[in-house]
């Protein structure tokens, strides 16, 4: 990695995390860490180009089959690859197979760019993360080795305590909110060797815990609006990304 390097193009590959859910904009679309990072990189490089091939709900096999070849063909300076978490959060998952497909993606992308960036994805504190923590740690240990083999950079978001704070997550408890995405963009920015704008690991101020009634009401709303629809999609074999095109499918000047 070149410290403080100037990148003239950036392609982001992945799922909802990279698409930008749930950093919502007034028009109903999503921004997210990749868009925020692209905006900052564009300030340093006139004519900077950006593509975001991410689609919500995609499993690692779909990311490899539907995004990796296209991203590699673009020949961007900088490529980010984040995937596999949708797989390991499912009730049944072959983590070794997930790792093998991730290796396939990295092997295709690393030779095509000047810098490949991988991530240890963040996890929201709570019973869901604890249930799946062994799988997540297995995946992220593999990511570390993958980076060594392919000369990639790893941004450790999983190890940042602040990104587990529920206040940085949306109501669906699966996606970061605007402040969470802002911190991820800063984490990648600093990992690329640029001067810090702020301490993205800084804990949030202490806050009084919500009362029992408020917590139960929040749990009920979460179950009704997010958990039950998610279960319904799993049972029917559908995905939130079915039929949805990539967020930004062509490597075009950033505006």
Image (spheres, grey):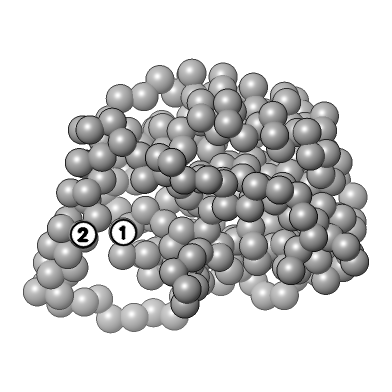
User: How far, Cα to Cα, is label 1 from label 2?
Assistant: 8 Å
Q: Are marks 1 and 2 in contact (CB under 8 Å)?
A: yes
Residue 132: x and y in percent read: 34, 37
Residue 72 lies in quadrant: top right
Q: Secondary structure at mark 2?
A: helix
Query: Which residue does the image show at 41% across and 57% down from the upper left?
Result: 175
Instruction: Name the residue beneath numbered marker 1.
Output: 172
Q: Quadrant of the C terminus?
A: bottom right
Query: Which residue does the image show at 83% across and 39% down from the upper left?
Result: 75
Q: Secondary structure at mark 1?
A: loop
Above or below, comparing residue 39 to residue 34 in the picture: below
- Tag count in the figure? 2
Above or below, comparing residue 182 to residue 65 in the picture: below
First reached walking from the N terminus: tag 1 or tag 2: 1
Looking at the image, can residue 44 be seen?
Answer: yes
Q: Quadrant of the N terminus?
A: top right
Residue 67: x and y in percent read: 62, 35
Instruction: Name the residue beneath numbered marker 2.
Output: 225
Disc 2: CA contacts within 10 A as few (<14), some (14-19) or many (>=20):
few
Looking at the image, can residue 219 be seen?
Answer: no
């Amino acid at each position: 990695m070149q410290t403080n390097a100037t990148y003239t193009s950036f392609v982001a590959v992945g799922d909802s995390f990279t698409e930008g859910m749930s950093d919502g904009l007034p028009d109903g679309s999503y921004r997210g860490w990749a868009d925020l990072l692209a905006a900052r990189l564009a300030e340093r490089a006139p004519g900077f180009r950006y593509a975001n091939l991410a689609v919500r709900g995609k499993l690692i096999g779909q990311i490899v089959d539907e995004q990796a070849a296209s991203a590699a063909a673009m020949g961007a300076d900088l490529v980010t690859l984040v995937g596999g978490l949708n797989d390991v959060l499912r009730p049944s998952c072959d983590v070794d197979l997930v790792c093998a497909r991730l290796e396939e993606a990295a092997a295709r992308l690393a030779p095509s760019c000047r810098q490949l960036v991988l991530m240890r994805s963040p996890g929201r504190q709570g019973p869901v993360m604890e249930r799946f923590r062994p799988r997540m740690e297995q995946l992220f240990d593999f990511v570390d080795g993958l980076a060594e083999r392919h000369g990639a950079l790893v941004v450790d978001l999983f190890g940042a305590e602040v990104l587990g704070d529920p206040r940085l997550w949306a109501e669906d408890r699966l996606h970061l909110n605007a402040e969470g995405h802002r911190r991820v963009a800063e984490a990648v920015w600093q990992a690329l060797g640029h001067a810090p704008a702020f301490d993205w690991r800084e804990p949030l101020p202490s806050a009084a815990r919500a009362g029992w009634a408020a917590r139960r009401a929040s749990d009920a709303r979460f179950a009704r609006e997010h958990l039950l629809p998610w279960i319904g999609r799993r049972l029917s074999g559908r995905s939130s990304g079915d039929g949805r095109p990539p967020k930004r499918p062509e490597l075009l000047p950033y505006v």
